[in-house]
């Protein structure tokens, strides 16, 4: 089951600061809902462990995250795949773009695509879509607060 999520976040920080934060595993870990660990394997590859609850199913996903199409400090693509055992799998990515909005402000736009399978996919598209949108919103708003409040 595939879905697309789009959004925008205004962050009270200069574009270079936001770009640096998008590549900082500590800030990403603190911003990702349910993230238990996030480690850099290389400048563009990370290993993640995330606990998610979708409806009645709670699962721990272990996966890989890769950064591609890097165009500092304006855009990149983040792709990931996680396996949650019997709960199923989730894979997807997001195109993230940064635009300067005055001297100390940045607009972060994202378009994320996700695909889920296994038990989680059986929960129905409405629940998965609403949960995915909520998680994406939580990530970008937490990220914006961490970076903009710093």
Image (tube, grey):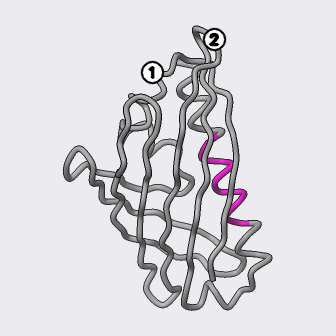
> With respect to residue 58, does 26 lie above or below?
above
Label 2, label 1: how far apart the Cα atoms are: 14 Å
Give residue 96's position: percent from left, percent from top. Answer: 53, 44
First in sequence: mark 2 or mark 1?
1
Look at discs 2 and 1 and give the one toward the viewer: 2
Residue found at x 66% / y 48%: 138
Give residue 39's position: percent from left, percent from top. Answer: 28, 51
Residue found at x 68% / y 59%: 5
Q: Report if residue 135 lies within the magenta region.
A: yes
Q: Predominant secondary structure in magenta?
A: helix
Residue found at x 37% / y 70%: 62
Residue sitting nearer the eye, 71 or 125: 71
The quarter of the picture where residue 36 lies is bottom left
Give the residue pinned by disc 2: 102
Q: Circles 2 and 1: CB distance less than 8 Å?
A: no
Give residue 146's position: percent from left, percent from top. Answer: 55, 29
Residue sitting nearer the eye, 4 or 127: 4
The range drawn in magenta is: 131-140
Q: Report if residue 7 lies within the magenta region.
A: no
Give the residue pinned by disc 1: 17
Q: Residue furthest right?
A: 126
């Amino acid at each position: 089951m595939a879905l697309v999520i789009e959004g925008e976040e205004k962050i009270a920080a200069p574009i270079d600061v936001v770009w640096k934060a998008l590549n900082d595993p500590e800030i990403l870990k603190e911003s990702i809902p349910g993230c238990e660990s996030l480690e850099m394997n290389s400048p563009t590859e990370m290993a993640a462990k995330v606990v998610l609850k979708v409806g009645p199913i709670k699962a721990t996903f272990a996966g890989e995250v890769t950064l591609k199409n890097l165009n500092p400090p304006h855009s990149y693509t983040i792709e990931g795949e996680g396996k949650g055992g019997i709960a199923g799998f989730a894979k997807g990515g997001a195109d993230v773009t940064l635009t300067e909005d005055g001297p100390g402000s940045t607009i972060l736009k994202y378009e994320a695509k996700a695909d889920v399978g296994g038990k989680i996919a059986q929960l129905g598209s409405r629940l998965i879509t609403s949960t995915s949108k909520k998680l994406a919103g939580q990530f970008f708003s937490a990220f914006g607060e961490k970076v903009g409040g710093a």
